Image (spheres, rainbow, N blue to C red):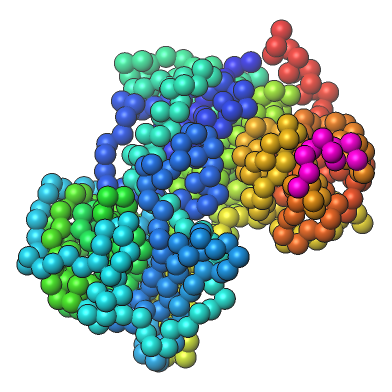
């Protein structure tokens, strides 16, 4: 059978190629560029727990080698610390919630707030770089990004210390985000692809036409390697100006220039080593247009990415203005003295909100920025693009190996477009509130804390603005049965990464078994972690459950966990290849398990699909 053609060699396209190869599906990646990426420290991405785990699983490399996991999160309004989360404390004590300081707002007006740096930077304009030394020779405050000592004293001397009425709240359970340069991410993906026999990357290949028929897709590229490519399916991962989308005549409505940011990457030391910061309404005077907020995100080696929210309009951000803004901001955070710094890269980042009308046209699909643009209020467009790839890969793999299931392939648009549309709606509803510039609403008690909570959700990947999507209304969701039992994970939501016992008796994390194109059946059996597998694999309900798993309409792996949040003993979880929960059943229910698995796969395979698959292999 012909390979899958992937147009675009950005993070989403490369991730999709690796995800398909892991499921034994060959693919061709059409790369318009030279095969390597420009190194730009002002173009960075923030990955949440699920997308970082996806990349690590596909590349086999820990992202900590290429990026930086934040030690904490801090948000401020004027001189007051509104919220502080210590990720390091959470990592060292998994039984206690994050420390989260939630300072009471004394009733001041809550003017414009929110924003931040975003994943793939659509509309980034470089206007310089190089190394600029600055500062008054003041001693550097605090330690390096990996040495958190001394930060409290530095903040206090700058008049920016925690409020005296800061208090512990119920905490936020989002793990520390992973921050890395986009070229480092694509570099890790490209390195993994070099060792994949099923992936061919064609550099210098610019798409100019697509023809599709019932049996496949033909694409033509121009350039030094211009030729015709034959594929079973084609996926456009070719960015905001997607050629694939235009050739399929798919509309891309939305809003232009929702937010604009001036961006600088620099090497320096700040008073809160390793912690990301959102500072709303900073108290110091600034040159040029006022900035309602500035965001600082740490990278490895004492490098920081700083983003200043720009007022609406198209005012030119000159190099002199940006350097002045850098000096003023650093001085404001360091008791009036600008510490030494080295300017590494600069840019202007423009956020657009757009959503393609259709994500599938026959055998052609859209993913990533070709299908959607988002990024306001700290949300990450690349996170959603990687989730697109994870969702689509197992469905294409099943169709490639077993023939097209139209309901299964259609579910990609139904699930992913609904999630992204909800994310865009949440951002569009929050923007007027957070960017209104004041008004009577800003004097409502607690409004500043409410604004801060919204922005924290966006930046940390939780709540309506940032949490991974739940496919509650998916066409792949099975009908309700009396054997269903509640657990803390809702059907359609990503499962919790618990430790499980695999079929070979080894202990692994549940996420390590994802992405291989198989369904996962997880039995909750307390005590199984104490005894060797050989002592319980033939005992109790295990033989009956093993027989039910073997009889499923698609290959499945039986795993056993000692516990799962909210699950009683002998609960059976059915998990999709992309890690979303299908259903939780009370005990061994072979008929219900089979029906749920069949629905998850798009329903029974048609005779036409089976005949087409057989013909393609002869």
Question: Does residue 182 appear left or right of residue 270 in this picture?
Answer: right
For the C terminus, which image quadrant?
top right
Q: Percent position (x, y) of residue 564? A: 73, 55
What residue lies at 21% left-to-right and 54% top-to-bottom? 267
Question: Does residue 352 appear left or right of residue 134 in this picture?
Answer: right
Question: Does residue 172 appear left or right of residue 598 in this picture?
Answer: left
> Which SS does the magenta portion mostly show?
loop
What residue lies at 20% left-to-right and 49% top-to-bottom? 345
Q: Percent position (x, y) of residue 353? A: 44, 56
Question: Does residue 409 appear left or right of residue 559 in this picture?
Answer: left
Is 198 placed above or below 448 here? above
Residue 578, visible in the rendered structure: no
What residue lies at 26% left-to-right and 53% top-to-bottom? 303
Is 260 placed above or below 479 here? below
Segment tinted magenta in the rendering: 530-539
> Hey, which quadrant is residue 232 in on the image?
top right
Is 90 placed above or below 227 here? below
**Does the stretch in magenta take in 537?**
yes
> Hey, which quadrant is residue 231 in on the image?
top right
What residue lies at 47% left-to-right and 83% top-to-bottom? 167
> Hey, which quadrant is residue 508 in on the image?
top right
For the N terminus, which image quadrant?
top right
**Does the stretch in magenta take in 493?**
no
Q: Percent position (x, y) of residue 575? A: 73, 44
């Amino acid at each position: 059978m012909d390979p899958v053609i992937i147009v675009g060699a950005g993070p989403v396209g490369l991730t999709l190629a690796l995800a398909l190869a892991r499921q034994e599906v060959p693919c061709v990646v059409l790369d318009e560029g030279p095969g390597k990426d420009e190194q730009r420290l002002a173009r960075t991405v923030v990955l949440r727990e699920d997308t970082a785990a996806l990349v690590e699983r596909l590349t086999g490399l820990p992202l900590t080698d290429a990026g930086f996991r934040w030690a904490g999160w801090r948000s401020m309004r004027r001189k007051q610390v509104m919220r502080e989360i210590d990720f390091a404390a959470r990592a060292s004590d998994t039984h206690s919630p994050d420390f989260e300081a939630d300072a009471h707002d004394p009733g001041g007006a809550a003017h414009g707030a929110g924003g931040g740096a975003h994943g793939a930077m659509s509309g980034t304009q470089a206007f310089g770089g190089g190394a600029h030394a600055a500062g008054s020779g003041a001693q550097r405050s605090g330690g390096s990004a990996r040495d958190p000592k001394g930060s409290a004293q530095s903040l206090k001397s700058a008049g920016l210390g925690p409020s005296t009425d800061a208090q512990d709240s119920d905490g936020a359970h989002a793990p520390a985000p992973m921050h890395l340069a986009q070229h480092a991410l694509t570099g890790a993906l490209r390195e993994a692809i070099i060792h994949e026999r099923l992936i061919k990357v064609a550099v210098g290949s610019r798409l100019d036409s697509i023809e599709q028929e019932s049996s496949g897709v033909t694409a033509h590229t121009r350039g030094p390697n211009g030729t015709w490519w034959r594929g079973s399916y084609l996926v456009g991962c070719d960015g905001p100006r997607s050629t694939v989308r235009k050739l399929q005549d798919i509309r891309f409505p939305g809003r232009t220039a929702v937010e604009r940011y001036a961006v600088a990457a620099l090497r320096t030391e700040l008073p809160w080593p390793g912690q990301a910061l959102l500072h709303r309404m900073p108290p110091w005077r600034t040159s040029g247009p006022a900035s309602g907020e500035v965001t600082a995100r740490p990278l490895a080696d004492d490098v920081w990415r700083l983003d200043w929210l720009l007022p609406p309009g198209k005012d030119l951000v000159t190099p002199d203005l940006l350097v002045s803004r850098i000096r003023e901001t650093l001085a404001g955070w360091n008791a009036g003295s600008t510490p030494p710094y080295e300017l590494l890269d600069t840019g202007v980042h423009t956020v657009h909100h757009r959503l393609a009308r259709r994500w599938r046209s026959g055998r052609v699909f859209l993913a990533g920025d070709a299908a959607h643009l988002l990024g306001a209020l700290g949300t990450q467009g690349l996170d959603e693009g990687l989730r697109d790839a994870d969702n689509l890969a197992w469905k294409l793999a099943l169709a490639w190996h077993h023939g097209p299931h139209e309901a299964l392939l259609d579910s990609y648009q139904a699930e992913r477009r609904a999630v992204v549309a909800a994310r865009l709606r949440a951002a569009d509803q929050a923007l007027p509130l957070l960017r209104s510039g004041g008004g009577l609403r800003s004097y409502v008690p607690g409004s500043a804390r409410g604004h801060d909570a919204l922005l924290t959700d966006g930046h940390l990947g939780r709540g309506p603005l940032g949490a991974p999507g739940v496919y509650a209304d998916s066409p792949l969701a099975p009908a309700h049965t009396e054997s269903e039992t509640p657990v803390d994970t809702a059907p359609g939501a990503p499962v919790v990464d618990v430790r499980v016992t695999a079929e070979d008796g080894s202990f692994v994390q549940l996420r390590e078994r994802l992405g291989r194109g198989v369904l996962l059946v997880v039995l909750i059996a307390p005590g199984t972690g104490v005894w060797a597998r050989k002592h319980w694999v033939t005992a109790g309900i295990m033989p009956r459950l093993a027989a039910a798993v073997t009889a499923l309409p698609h290959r499945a792996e039986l795993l056993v966990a000692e516990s799962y949040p909210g699950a009683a003993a002998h609960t059976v979880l059915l998990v999709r290849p992309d890690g979303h929960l299908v259903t939780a059943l009370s005990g061994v229910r072979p008929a219900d398990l089979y029906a749920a698995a069949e629905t998850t796969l798009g329903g029974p395979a048609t005779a036409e699909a089976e005949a087409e698959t057989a013909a393609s292999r002869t």
